[in-house]
């Protein structure tokens, strides 16, 4: 644990799912609907330091969130990336991509760069607290259904 690392913070939220090695977190920037990331539960800054078990569990978590987001929002594609530019802690971004507008709770989401690389830095879309919480609850609920089913 690194006391200066925001991904090691006990205040990291909202956590959608906690596994043995990874925490699934809803990204506060919802410029692309359902954008999440998996954060390693231990602090390391090198992807090559992942254990075999951590890789195995990462694959399971990626499958679970990808299946869940497909079911909820029907993305046309996904990008997965270990960027670690601003926060060095190992974490993988799950970025759904959309050819057409998606609507959630009265908010329209567009992916103006699809199918090309999304803009970096991508324009932020900070949802109202109520809509953000509704999104977190909806994804959590579907994750549980997917794990059980």
Image: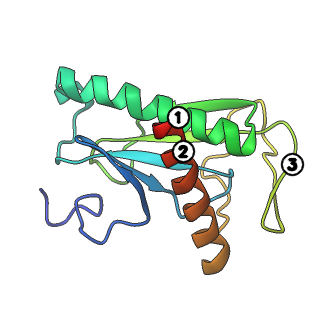
Q: Quadrant for residue 131, please give it.
A: bottom right
Q: Viewed as shown, does residue 6 lie left or right of 140? A: left
Residue 92 in sight in this render:
yes
- Which residue occupies the extreme bottom position in the image? 129
Please name the residue that numbered disc 2 is placed on: 145
Q: Viewed as shown, does residue 41 lie left or right of 16? A: left
Q: How far apart are marks 3 and 2 (CA)?
A: 26 Å
Please name the residue that numbered disc 1 is placed on: 149
Pick whichever, 107 or 48, lies toward us: 107
Q: How crowded is mark 1: few (under 14 residues within 10 Å), some or many (20 or more)?
A: few
Pick whichever, 18 or 87, lies toward us: 18
Q: Nearer the N terminus, badge 3 or badge 1?
A: 3
Q: Residue at x 67, y 36 (%)?
A: 70
Q: Which residue is drawn at 13% across and 59% down?
A: 2
Q: Which residue is drawn at 53% across and 38% down?
A: 146
Q: Distance between the residues labelled 2 and 1?
A: 6 Å
Q: Kindly identify which numbered label has been placed on residue 28.
A: none
Q: Nearer the N terminus, badge 3 or badge 2?
A: 3
Could you tell me which secondary element the residue under label 2 belongs to? helix
Q: Viewed as shown, does residue 105 lie left or right of 148? A: right
User: Where in the figure is residue 46, as x and y percent of width and height?
Assistant: 22, 34
Do tag 2 and tag 1 residues touch (Cβ < 8 Å)?
yes
Q: How crowded is mark 2: few (under 14 residues within 10 Å), some or many (20 or more)?
A: few
Q: In which quarter of the image is the N terminus?
A: bottom left
Pick whichever, 11 or 3, lies toward us: 11
Could you tell me which secondary element the residue under label 1 belongs to? loop
Could you tell me which secondary element the residue under label 3 belongs to? loop
How many numbered circles does the render carry? 3
Q: Kindly identify which numbered label has been placed on residue 101.
A: 3
Of discs 3 and 2, which sits in the foreground? 2
């Amino acid at each position: 644990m690194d006391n200066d690392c925001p991904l090691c913070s006990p205040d990291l939220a909202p956590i959608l799912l906690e596994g043995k090695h990874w925490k699934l977190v809803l990204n506060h920037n919802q410029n692309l609907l359902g954008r999440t990331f998996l954060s390693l539960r231990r602090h390391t800054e090198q992807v090559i330091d992942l254990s075999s078990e951590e890789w195995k569990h990462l694959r399971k978590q990626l499958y679970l969130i990808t299946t869940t987001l497909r079911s909820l929002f029907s993305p046309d594609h996904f990008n997965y990336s270990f960027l670690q530019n601003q926060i060095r802690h190992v974490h993988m971004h799950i970025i759904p991509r959309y050819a057409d507008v998606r609507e959630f709770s009265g908010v329209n989401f567009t992916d103006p760069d699809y199918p090309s690389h999304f803009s970096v830095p991508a324009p932020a879309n900070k949802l109202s607290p109520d809509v953000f919480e509704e999104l977190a609850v909806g994804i959590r609920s579907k994750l549980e259904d997917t794990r059980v089913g």
